[in-house]
Image: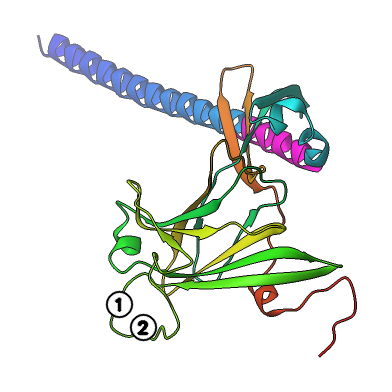
Amino acid sequence: MKLKERSGQVLILVLLVVVVALAVGLSVASRNITNLRTSTQTEQSQRAFTAAEGGVEDVLQRLATIANTTEVKTGGTYSETFPVGGLQATVSIKSQTAYSRTIELGEVGQINLDGATNTTNIQIEWAKNGDSSETAQPASIMLTLVRDAGGGNYAQTRYGVTGGTFAGRDESGFDAPGSAPMTSCTSSEYAKCTQIPWEAGAKLLRIRPLWVKATVKVSCIGASCIFPVQLYDISSVATTDLGVTRKVQVLRSALAELPAFFDYALYSEGDIIK
């Protein structure tokens, strides 16, 4: 009887050891499978991202040529699919004639006016609604309109537009958004809005926020007015054989943006006489 009890106890111990060993083995196997799956997904994700990024880089190198295609010049979408690193990258380029961008403090936004048609006023909206960092005390803005004055000379018209009267701001010489020759306007998306008159020979408009950053939108006012292209929205998508997809999106200014000190420089194609 005792022999049978001992045999039963040994069998139970053996079964317990087998169960524990099996559990440990399954746990290790599951962990290895999970690690392998994670490693595979990471590798696939990196491949897709690298291919998508490579697609953007390829298009940026050819952007000057692509910008002259009918699709891009007319505001349509231009697409290409080509191999990058063993994967296919599909890149789409869409042009935007309306300027919309967040300009950080100390930076300058630059709007291309060369080639604009049927424009009577330029509308500037800033301080995006819904962003308390912009609307609590809206930025004041400095506007510099650069125009071709003829004879190889260029001229500037400057506007200082206040964002409001707030403690600690010394803005002597700044005007309210509706002060002549500016025109007041309203916006459903932005807290501040003003219009400045169009000037013959206008080439570019530079906007510099003061005190805080500003999200700015610039558009033309006039019957059937058209602005030249301001931004290129470039998106690139790549998918691996296992179905992992990654997308890279880049906004590229159509006009190279000159640094802030340009606003305090003099430029002439001829001689500068004091």
Q: Residue 274, position in %: x, y?
A: 81, 91
Q: Nearest the camera: 172 or 20?
A: 172
The kind of residue tagged 1 is Thr
Residue 156 appears anywhere in the view? yes
Give the extent of the magenta segment.
Answer: 46-61
Give the quarter of the image for residue 60.
top right
Q: Is residue 124 shown in magenta?
A: no
Q: Nearest the camera: 58 or 260?
A: 260
Q: Residue 26, position in %: x, y?
A: 39, 21
The kind of residue tagged 2 is Arg
What is the number of the mark on residue 165? 1
Q: Residue at x 90, y 80 (%)?
A: 271
How many marks can you see?
2
Reading the image, the residue beneath label 2 is: 169
Residue 86 appears anywhere in the view? no
Q: Residue 82, position in %: x, y?
A: 77, 23
> Which secondary structure class fits the magenta region best?
helix
Q: Is residue 49 shown in magenta?
A: yes
Q: Nearest the camera: 100 or 219?
A: 219
Asked whether the residues under the numbered discs 1 and 2 touch, taking CB atoms below 8 Å apart as contact, a structural biologist would say: yes
Q: Residue at x 38, y 71 (%)?
A: 176
Q: Is residue 51 above or below residue 220?
A: above
Callout 2 crowding tier (Cα within 10 Å): few <14, some 14–19, many ≥20: few
